[in-house]
Image (spheres, rainbow, N blue to C red):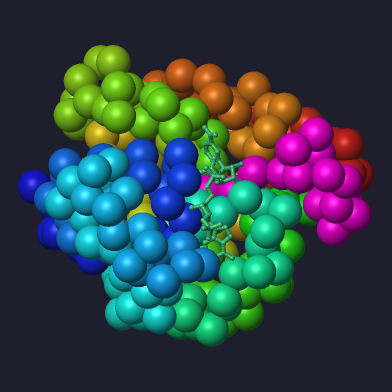
Amino acid sequence: MPQPLTIGILGAGRVGTAVGRQAVRAGHTVKIATSRPAEEIKLLTEVIVPGATAVNRDELRGSDIIVLAVPLHKYRSIDASVLQGHVVIDTMNYWAPVDGIMEEFETGRSTSEVIADFLGDVRLVKTLNHIGYGDLEVDSYPAGDTKRRALAVASDDEAAKQLVAEFVDSLGYDAVDAGPLSAGRTYENGTEIFNGRHTAEQMRALLDQCQQVLTGASA
Ligand SMILES: NC(=O)c1ccc[n+]([C@@H]2O[C@H](COP(=O)([O-])OP(=O)(O)OC[C@H]3O[C@@H](n4cnc5c(N)ncnc54)[C@H](OP(=O)(O)O)[C@@H]3O)[C@@H](O)[C@H]2O)c1
């Protein structure tokens, strides 16, 4: 069993609670916060993520990893001060029918590059965005199982990416290095990787293909 981590989760909706349950199962310490006081999500957390603790968002400071699981159109309401200096996972996706048209996400950059600019001094890693919240628990398999699914991991910070890759592995998935944060475009909404079930080998091939298409398109 890998080293247990302290995982902070910002957002107690579908994704935040699914990641929380899976992280508790993997033996990590899990703290969950929203924009509201801890007291208001205490019961929900006890019932929906047994073993996790509801906290005020300030108390996420010091977590080994903080998972952002907030609707993308609300990103400007995130209290970035709490995240400074931390390894942060960006699970958020841009989907115009739900988020509304947001010009900053219509430029062809990875949504995570925009989020990184907004957050400031944060070691941002993009992953867990391309698996359905309902799949996260049922598709988990131990390392080496032939049914094991892969998840892509991208970051400009190699050490942060490595730590998150270990966390992803502990959740029951093979982490595949997708490269820098800009490569996150290859597994955003509308790509073949998004929501598909792929082994690590298939994921590597798809990431290469998508990167070539994107590089060709922008040349
Ligand atoms: N649906 C999927 O299967 C899936 C899979 C992977 C990734 N994603 C992405 O994950 C993100 C979250 O989706 P979701 O379906 O989990 O959303 P959701 O169910 O609507 O939950 C959002 C949570 O974020 C909290 N929140 C909102 N603004 C906040 C803020 N400023 N600070 C702290 N917490 C805040 C909300 O609580 P309060 O409003 O009370 O603060 C709520 O607990 C989206 O970007 C989505 O695209 C979705």
Locate residue 78, reporting x and y percent. 60, 69
Above or below, 131 against 215 in this view is above
Residue located 27% across and 53% down the image: 43
Query: In the displayed structure, does residue 23 sit left or right of residue 155?
Result: left
Query: In the displayed structure, does residue 35 sit left or right of residue 118?
Result: left
Q: Main secondary structure of the magenta part?
A: loop
Residue located 28% across and 15% down the image: 147
Residue located 51% across and 67% down the image: 35
Q: Which residues are magenta?
A: 91-108
Locate residue 213, reporting x and y percent. 78, 31
Quarter-wise, where is residue 150 in the image?
top left
Q: Nearer the viewer, residue 165 or 100?
A: 100
Query: In the displayed structure, does residue 138 sit left or right of residue 33?
Result: left
Can I make out residue 87 in this image? no
Can I make out residue 45 in this image? yes
Location of the C terminus by quadrant is top right
Q: Nearer the viewer, residue 116 or 178?
A: 116
Q: Is residue 90 magenta?
A: no
Which residue of the protein is positioned furthest toward the left in this rendering?
1
Q: Nearer the viewer, residue 63 or 117?
A: 63
Above or below, 141 against 104 in this view is above
Locate residue 56, reporting x and y percent. 37, 74
Above or below, 181 against 199 in this view is below
Q: Is residue 92 magenta?
A: yes
Locate residue 195, reporting x and y percent. 55, 25
Which residue of the protein is positioned furthest toward the top in this rendering?
147
Residue located 85% across and 36% down the image: 216
